[in-house]
């Protein structure tokens, strides 16, 4: 908001009020992440997997066979697996996602692309 306010010559509060009015009127209908050009091999994502039944050793075996899969976490709650992947391109991510979604015991799959790492500890 600060940079927008500076560009249009208004205070932050006045800018925030105008943006809120534009959102309410439907002029601004949403926002998107513009991740720009990423270097090859730099797209990291999480595949959030819901299985039809657990445990599913077959799915784990198949995931282990994908070179782009870095780590797989079995988790509690609505999801069953969180799969950390690193791929060369959005197309490669889409291909991997399609292959994982078609595995026998996979019921649902959501993909979350990592935009940045804010905190990382070893």
Image (cartoon, grey):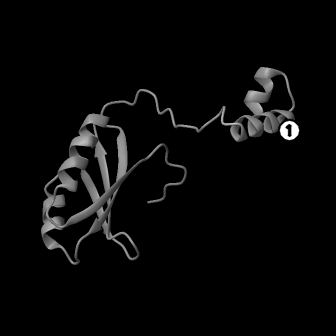
The foreground one among 7 and 68 is 7
Residue 109's image quarter?
bottom left
Q: Where is residue 118 in the image (x, y as percent from the top left)?
A: 55, 50
Q: Position of residue 54 (x, y in %)?
A: 23, 77
Q: Residue at the spot x=25%, y=49% of the render?
A: 97
Q: Residue at the spot x=86%, y=34% of the render?
A: 14
Q: Residue at the spot x=83%, y=35% of the render?
A: 12
Residue 64's image quarter?
bottom left
Q: In this view, does 79 lie above or below 120?
A: below
The foreground one among 33 and 104 is 104
Q: Give the residue at mark 1.
A: 13
Q: Where is residue 15 in the image (x, y as percent from the top left)?
A: 81, 33
Q: Quadrant of the C terminus?
A: bottom left
Q: Is residue 122 above or below residue 2?
A: below
Is residue 89 in view? Answer: no
Outermost front residue: 25
Q: How crowded is mark 1: few (under 14 residues within 10 Å), some or many (20 or more)?
A: few
Please tell me how many numbered marks the rendered image carries: 1
Q: Does residue 76 appear left or right of residue 28 in this picture?
A: left
Q: Does residue 96 appear left or right of residue 75 in this picture?
A: left
Q: Quadrant of the N terminus?
A: top right
């Amino acid at each position: 908001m600060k940079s927008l306010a500076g560009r249009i010559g208004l205070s932050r509060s006045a800018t925030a009020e105008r943006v809120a009015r534009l959102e309410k009127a439907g002029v601004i209908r949403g926002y998107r992440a513009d991740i720009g050009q990423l270097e090859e091999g730099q797209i990291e994502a999480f595949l959030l997997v819901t299985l039809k039944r657990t445990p599913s050793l077959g799915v784990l075996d198949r995931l282990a066979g994908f070179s782009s899969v870095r780590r797989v976490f079995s988790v509690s709650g609505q999801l069953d697996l969180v799969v950390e992947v690193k791929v060369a391109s959005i197309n490669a991510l889409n291909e991997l996602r399609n292959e994982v979604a078609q595995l026998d015991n996979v019921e649902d799959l959501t993909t979350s692309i990592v935009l940045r790492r804010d905190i990382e500890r070893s």
